[in-house]
Image (tube, rainbow, N blue to C red):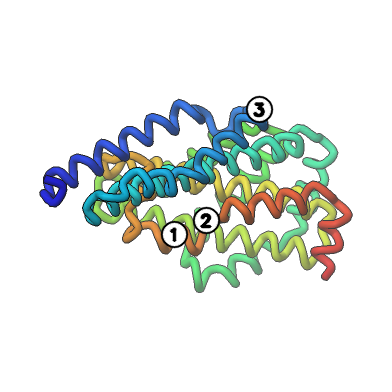
Amino acid sequence: MCKCSEVQDFIKTVDYTFYQNLVEVLMPDVLRPIPSTLTQSIRNFAKGLESWLTAAMNDCPEEMMQIKLTAVSAFAQTLRRYTSLNHLAQAARAVLQNSSQINQMLADLNRVDFHNVQEQASWVCQCDYAVVQRLEADFKVTLQQQNSLEQWAVWLKGVVTQVLKPYDGKPTFAKAARQFLLKWSFYSSMVIRDLTLRSAASFGSFHLIRLLYDEYMFYLIEHQVAIATGTTPIAVMGDKNQTCQMMNNFGNTSNGIENTLADTSNTNQLKRMKMS
């Protein structure tokens, strides 16, 4: 029975649905503050999932074990990413609530040569210049308004909706979403590079905000792709044929995020990093 393709498809669908429900119970809102003890418990739980399942299915057919392991691996990766995203959100919340830091960020951002950034990024990204200009202006206005993290989340969701709207209902939706992630990441890295070269006083704040927005954009995209394909976000991440390139080129690993958070917690250390 385990070798029957219909049974395998059923098991895969049920596993992804079950794990998605667990994620929504454990972390119903990735931006809402949660106790550090709960975060650590979730990460410890995720760390042991694959080994526990492997031990439990020791005598199962290889095909079924692979299906189960793929699903649980996607579940564990999702938990690690979401807890890291939540950690970033709480660190960034303090920055977004600090008026003096926001004013410094705005002053530094206004000194960035966006025309030069666009020229350098255009060959790789091939973005519509009007869209880039609009996003730049919207970002500056939103920053100037000193909006909360939740308001920034609404803005980011609006960006995703606007960019992907032309692909609604089309088979190219998932590909367009992945391409947008790569373009967003590349363009924002060029802005960070310009800030670094100018020795911007708010470099550390921008670096932290950039990490958060990249991760949250990833979160939004995977949910939009899930809706478009009629599946769950975990199933989207479990499909390695569609997502391995996106994960390798765009996603920050959980350990990398935590190391960066440790760096950004010390302003002096960040200044030494950017000058080196």
Q: How many marks?
A: 3
In the drawing, does residue 163 fall left or right of residue 137? left
Q: Residue at x 59, y 46 (%)?
A: 213
- Callout 3–callout 2 Cβ contact below 8 Å: no
CA neighbours of label 2 inside 10 A, class few (<14), some (14 to 19), many (20+)? many
Q: Secondary structure at mark 2?
A: loop
| Residue drawn at x 65%, y 30% as measured from the top left | 37
Marks 3 and 2, Cα distance to the nearest angstrom?
25 Å
Most foreground residue, 60 or 149 = 60
Q: Is residue 161 toward the left or the right of residue 215 in the image?
A: left
Mark carried by residue 251: 2
**Location of mark 1 (residue):** 246
Answer with mark 1 or mark 3, whichever residue precedes in sequence: 3
* Pointer 3 or 2: first along the chain: 3
Instruction: Establish if 17 lies above or below 184.
Output: above
Q: Residues within 10 Å of mark 1 (few under 14, many from 20)?
A: some
- Please indicate whether residue 179 sits to the left or right of residue 194 in the image: left
Q: In which quadrant of the rendered view does residue 224 lie?
A: top left
Q: Tag 1, which secondary structure?
A: helix
Quadrant holding the N terminus? top left
Q: Which residue corresponds to the image point at 41% horizontal and 31% vertical from the top-left?
A: 22
For badge 3, the amino acid type reads: Pro
Judged by depth in the image, the label closer to the viewer, 3 or 2, is: 3
Which residue is rendered at x = 26% and y = 50% of the image? 59
Amino acid residing under circle 1: Met
**Residue that label 3 marks:** 35
Circles 1 and 2: CB atoms closer than 8 Å:
yes
Residue 154 picture location, percent across and down = 54, 34
